Image: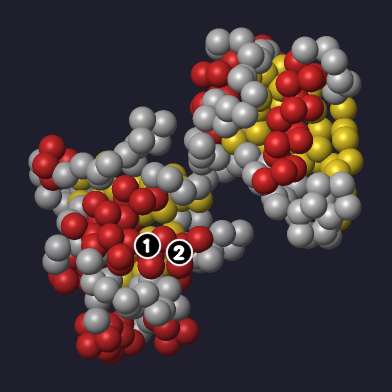
Amino acid sequence: MTVVNAWQQLQASLSQGPACLVWVERVQGSAPREQGAWMAVPAGLAPGCMQALVGSIGGGHLEYQALAHAQAVLQGRAPAGVQRYALGPSLGQCCGGVVYLGYVAIQAQDLPRWQHLQRPRMPVAVFGAGHVGQALVSLLQGLPCQTTWVDSRPGIWAETEPTPMASWAPQALQLQADPVQDAVTDLPAGSRVLILTHSHAEDWEILLACLARQRAAADLPFLGLIGSASKWASFRRRLLERGFAAEAVDAVHCPMGVPGVQGKEPEVIAVAVAAQLMQTRGM
């Protein structure tokens, strides 16, 4: 079960029949999920079957109770509307807070009324389709990201596929650009940029373009560059010589990835970088 591409899953589910939409109306104190989190329970879902659920309100006993109530709503045995759940006293969950869940039976034609529950994905630009780029893009497919994947080499996409990807996962936008730094101009505002090409020269040109855009628009909240401390020392010196402010240069994350993750395997690096990206949500 995944919540990343849940809206598309919900559309597909409703094409087969009605469902009960369950959402977190509000919370008091500690709770498994935040206000606005939701799930959908298809009509005819077998008791205890979790695979057909769309989305999640946090799992555990709360979700189990919500599933039962949603099925009762669909069968006309329970009212729609908002229900209160005290997590500690009534459900035995250690969160200890209070969750208010809303319930409504919907069909495909009702979906536009609930568009506000659809969460935007964080824009991420990955420059480089080598081993680390492949591992990273594959991992990002399961996270709330909209990925643009850029490389300068013609034909690279015929040879390089992020693997494995589940059938529900949104594909990354693959963009071949030469010179590769030209792609920086067209990135969506708010993009997190990860630079990990096959060439230090390309890394340099992309970083220059990103810092120039930051100086003009300040709309790239995260710049990450793969490399060693010695590579960054050389890049930093050259950037300062180019006239970039020390504050802007020092905002670049190089080496990138959360500290403390041991190993240089592409998949390990990808986990560390993706974790660092998730720390920037809401920026």
Indicate the position of residue 279 as horizontal and vertical percent values. Answer: 53, 66
Q: In this orientation, does residue 181 appear?
A: no
Q: Mark 1 and mark 2: span between their CA atoms?
A: 6 Å
Indicate the position of residue 274 as horizontal and vertical percent values. Answer: 41, 61
Q: Nearer the viewer, residue 72 or 6?
A: 72
Element at badge 1? helix
Crowding at dot 2, Cα within 10 Å, few <14 / some 14-19 / many 20+, comes out as few
Q: Nearer the viewer, residue 214 or 108?
A: 108
On screen, residue 168 versus residue 24, left or right, reads left
Count of numbered circles on the image: 2
Tell me, yes or no, whether the two marked residues, 1 and 2, touch with CB atoms within 8 Å.
yes
In the picture of the structure, the residue carrying the numbered disc 1 is 271
Q: Is residue 154 above or below residue 182?
A: above
Q: In this view, does 211 lie above or below 147?
A: below
Residue 214 placement: quadrant: bottom left
Residue 264 placement: quadrant: bottom left
Q: Specify the amino acid type for callout 2.
A: Ala
Residue 74 placement: quadrant: top right
Q: Nearer the viewer, residue 92 or 58?
A: 92
Q: Which residue is drawn at 13% across and 37% down?
A: 158
Quadrant where the C terminus lies?
A: bottom right
In the picture of the structure, the residue carrying the numbered disc 2 is 275
Q: Residue at x 42, y 83 (%)?
A: 250
Q: Is residue 235 above or below residue 15?
A: below
Tag shown at residue 87: none
